[in-house]
Image (cartoon, grey):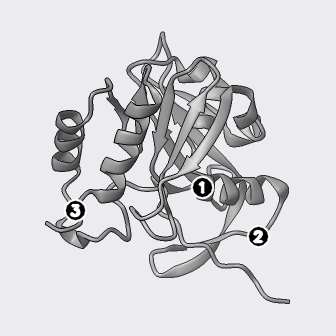
Amino acid sequence: MSRNKLQLVCDNIAPDPLGGFRIVESMHSGVFDLAGDYGEIAARIHPLKQQLFDAMVKGDEVTAQVDGASVVLNRDVELRVTHARRALATVPYGHVAGKLAVGVRGQLAVRGFDEGAEPVMRQMRDGSYRVVFCTMPPRSHALGAAFDVDGFGDALLNAVKAEVVWDDQDVIHVPAATEEEIREIYQFIVQYGKGM
């Protein structure tokens, strides 16, 4: 039997007080109370991470490299998210799994930005949008190591008409936009760094 191999960058792999290791993924927002909105949390998880996290919750064996050794990760992922009344709250990914459909109307991959880990643009049921990156900086971009996250963000803010809010390292929130403005954001992301 062959094993699937998916290489991802997650925020942290930490020893679990009950034994073994676990993934700890941090999510922050200046716009949303993430601890109170599992649909919003799900909308901010890139499809590749979702695939990995779902496999873990289902009970598939998932390994990671820790100090040069391969270790098996525990079955759930600890999400540390912003809370309206406290700095951070902890939510197990198992509580969030399957919630994506609750708030998302549609999704489009932004092909040509980060091969194998393309960002997605998600239209939410309230008409807003999330642009979700797998990792930022991207792992396979035309600019390679020269990719500057701050430069990318500044250029995006200056290049598009729609209001965009860089709400987390991997998430851009677009409160409202026309079809033309969404196409403009899409084209900016796809073309960024090409021909520079």
Please name the residue that numbered disc 1 is placed on.
Answer: 49
Label 1 or label 3, whichever comes before in sequence order: 1
Residue furthest to the front in view is 180
Q: Is residue 23 left or right of residue 155?
A: right
Please name the residue that numbered disc 3 is placed on.
Answer: 193
User: SS of the residue at dot 1?
Assistant: helix
Q: Nearer the viewer, residue 130 or 38?
A: 130
Q: Is residue 148 left or right of residue 66?
A: left
Q: Position of residue 9 (x, y in %)?
A: 47, 62
Mark 3 closeness class: few <14, some 14–19, many ≥20 residues within 10 Å: some
Q: Nearer the viewer, residue 83 or 2?
A: 2
Q: Quadrant of the C terminus?
A: bottom left
Mark 2 closeness class: few <14, some 14–19, many ≥20 residues within 10 Å: few
Please name the residue that numbered disc 2 is placed on.
Answer: 61
Query: Which residue corresponds to the image point at 54% horizontal and 72% vertical from the top-left?
Result: 7
Task: Note whether residue 19 is visible.
Answer: no
